[in-house]
């Protein structure tokens, strides 16, 4: 006995649509890539992950890193239990690079190991100086751009003092 095939009620256009949806849903979502930066200092090495959703800040930081701007600069400010700060070519806290960037406030918080951009009273005056929080500092949240987090070597960060140097700062490929 011959079995009769039932005709599908789905037309060719609908089939294509269904197939496209199946293909699209099988593609994994794009993974956000957070660049990592390695800081070789006089106290040892630490690695920080930079947040991709703080674009102007990390673009500026990565451009300076690729130009070897930070290599050899000192940490000119140390506030125990608060921050270690560097990135000033003058070593006084008054210098910077040749460009300022706008303030980018995000949902990231000033927790121990957070990287933030230092600036003057002008919110859009950040340049090259940055700090690493040595402890939580939530009173800074909403006023300064947090753009990364120390992922390895927090003990090395905590050992840094005024006058210690960034020997080499590189992008981790």
Image (cartoon, grey):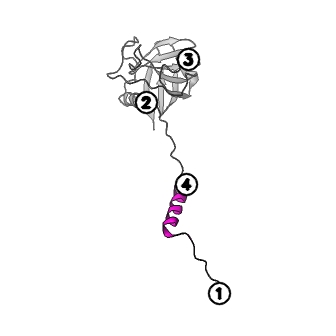
Q: Quadrant of the N terminus?
A: bottom right
Q: Quadrant of residue 127?
A: top left
User: Badge 3 local density, few (<14 within 10 Å), some, or many (20+)?
Assistant: few
Q: Main secondary structure of the magenta part?
A: helix
- Asked whether the beta carbons under mark 1 and mark 3 sit within 8 Å of each other, the answer is no
Viewer-side residue, 44 vs 96: 96
Look at discs 4 and 3 and give the one toward the viewer: 4
Q: Residue pushed farthest right?
A: 1
Q: Would you name the residue on which mark 4 appears?
A: 25
Using the image, determine if residue 94 lies above or below residue 60: above
Instruction: Provide the residue span drawn in magenta.
Output: 7-28
Q: Nearer the viewer, mark 2 or mark 3?
A: 2
Instruction: Mark 2 or mark 1: name the one nearer the start of the chain.
Output: 1
Of circles 4 and 2, the one toward us is 4
Q: Nearer the viewer, mark 4 or mark 1?
A: 1
Does dot 1 land on a helix, a strand or a loop? loop
For this orientation, the residue located farthest to the bottom is 1
Q: Earlier in the sequence, mark 2 or mark 3?
A: 2
Asked whether the residues under the numbered discs 4 and 3 touch, taking CB atoms below 8 Å apart as contact, a structural biologist would say: no
Residue hosting label 2: 58
Report how far apart the C-alphas of labels 2 and 3 lie in the structure.
Answer: 25 Å
Q: CA distance from mark 4 to mark 3?
A: 48 Å
Q: Earlier in the sequence, mark 1 or mark 3?
A: 1
Q: Name which residue lies at 53% across and 58% down.
A: 21
Which residue was labeled with disc 3?
159
Q: Tell me how many marks there are.
A: 4
Label whose residue precedes the other's in the sequence (4 or 1):
1
N-terminal of the two: label 4 or label 3? 4
Residue 2, which numbered label? 1
Mark nearer the N terminus (4 vs 2): 4
Location of residue 76 by image quarter = top left
């Amino acid at each position: 006995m011959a079995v009769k095939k039932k005709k599908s009620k789905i037309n060719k256009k609908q089939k294509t649509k269904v197939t496209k949806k199946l293909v699209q849903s099988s593609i994994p979502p794009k993974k956000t890539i957070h660049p990592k930066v390695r800081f070789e200092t006089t106290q040892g090495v630490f690695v920080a992950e930079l947040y991709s959703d703080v674009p102007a800040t990390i673009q500026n930081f990565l451009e300076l890193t690729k130009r070897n701007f930070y290599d050899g600069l000192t940490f000119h400010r140390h506030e125990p239990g608060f921050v270690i700060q560097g990135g000033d070519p003058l070593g006084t806290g008054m210098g910077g690079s040749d460009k300022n960037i706008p303030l980018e406030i995000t949902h990231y918080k000033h927790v121990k190991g957070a990287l933030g951009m230092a600036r003057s009273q002008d919110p859009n005056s950040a340049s090259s100086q940055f700090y690493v929080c040595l402890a939580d500092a939530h009173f800074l949240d909403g006023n300064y751009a947090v753009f990364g987090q120390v992922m390895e070597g927090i003990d090395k960060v905590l050992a840094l003092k005024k006058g210690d140097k960034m020997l080499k700062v590189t992008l981790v490929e």
